[in-house]
Image (cartoon, rainbow, N blue to C red):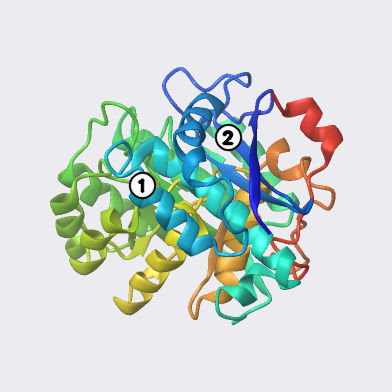
Amino acid sequence: MKITEIRITGLTGGTVDGGWPQGNKPEEDLNTLVEVITDEGLTGLGSVMTSKALVSAGVKLLLPHLIGERADEPARVTEKLRQSSFWQGRGGAVEHAISGIDIGLWDLFGKITNQPVSRLLGGNYRSRIKPYGSILFDEPGPLREALHATVARGFRAIKLGWRPFGRRDRKFDELLISTARDTVGAHVELMVDAGGSEQYWPHGFKWALETAKMLADYDIVWFEEPLPPDDLEGYIELRRHSPVPIATGEVLTRRQSFRPFLERHAVDIIQPDCTKCGGLTEAWRIAWMAYDHNIQWVPHGWNTAIGLAADLHLSAAMPVARYVEYLTPSPYLDEIITEPFRVDAEGYLTVPDKPGLGVELDREALHKYGG
């Protein structure tokens, strides 16, 4: 079975505000779907967390190395793409495009072999995992409402991220955290994402350390992106002194970029995003590298139902996995597949067990949000 075509669909009209200074308007496209089409009628689904324009440019670059290739060898084919585009890629937007193709090839591999991707990745250590509802910080009143709504959806773990946390003063930051803890009680796990990959991030090691000490008083599970993503030495120092676990990694691409963070134990939790870092193949390699260094792996997943399905399969195939990220509410998770994911009564998601990723696009919804 050979690859004959790549179909690209940018998602617009339902984009969640990403917490940037001016916010991301719904019409802006931050997620793109990729379909890998074969000569025998099978199609593999992939997802990329970047714009359609960038994905289209990346696919145009990669297409000569892809058309006519086998549809059942994802790791080899995407490594060929990586090596063939080395002088024009080596990370960044080209690696983002490779990510979507790679996820689509794993979906195809599963459909061809009639196996779920988790089994092809090595086998199932678990059949379900806890999702954390990923939402943005807000003023205390709206924040309470958002937290109540997230708990009502069944989530027993919630991550709060970005503005206005870290943008005013320490007193206001603590007000937000105390509001969150008072609202959800002690039984719901809380994580905090400072959003240190924001443009012109103003804070350094001392702010991060003092904030970490405050977060420890509220039993925060981890402190994410408290520093800019390339501040390796800062993360090393912060992890040594922070009373709460430190997490980062969502913007890194290629396994080589993750290596120093793992080899030097710069973090307690590493967070590759398979829709950006190189697909399931690279995320699998990074997750095992983290396991070998006794560092927790938690996939970053501010993307789509296709990305979540990929994270679920990889989480099933890793010896140690505790959480997946679930952007909520978002039509790109809740509406674009025919059987949307549902959190069970205990706050868990079941890993799909159908061939491939185990999800199917809702073409009507795709017509609504796709372009």
Q: Is residue 342 left or right of residue 191?
A: right
Q: Could you give the CA–CA distance between mark 1 and mark 2, rounded to whole angstroms?
A: 25 Å
Residue at image x 63%, y 44%?
147
Dot 1: element: helix
Along the line of sight, the residue nearer the viewer: 98 or 365: 98
Specify the amino acid type for callout 2: Asn
Kindly identify the residue that appears in the image at 62 percent across and 41 percent down: 34
Q: Earlier in the sequence, mark 1 or mark 2?
A: 2
Q: Position of residue 46 (x, y in %)?
A: 62, 48
- Label 2 belongs to which residue? 31
Q: Relative to the observer, which residue lies in front, 233 or 336?
A: 336
Left/right placement of residue 332 relative to residue 92 reads: right
Q: Which residue is mark 1?
A: 84
Q: Residue furthest front?
A: 68
Residue 89 in the image, given as x and y percentages of width and height: 33, 39
- Say whether residue 37 is left or right of residue 318: right
Give me the residue at 56% from left, 28% from top. 52
Q: Relative to 27, say whether 54 is above or below.
A: below
Labels 1 & 2 near each other (Cβ < 8 A): no
Q: Is residue 135 placed above or below 342 in the rendered structure? A: above
How many numbered tags mark residues here? 2
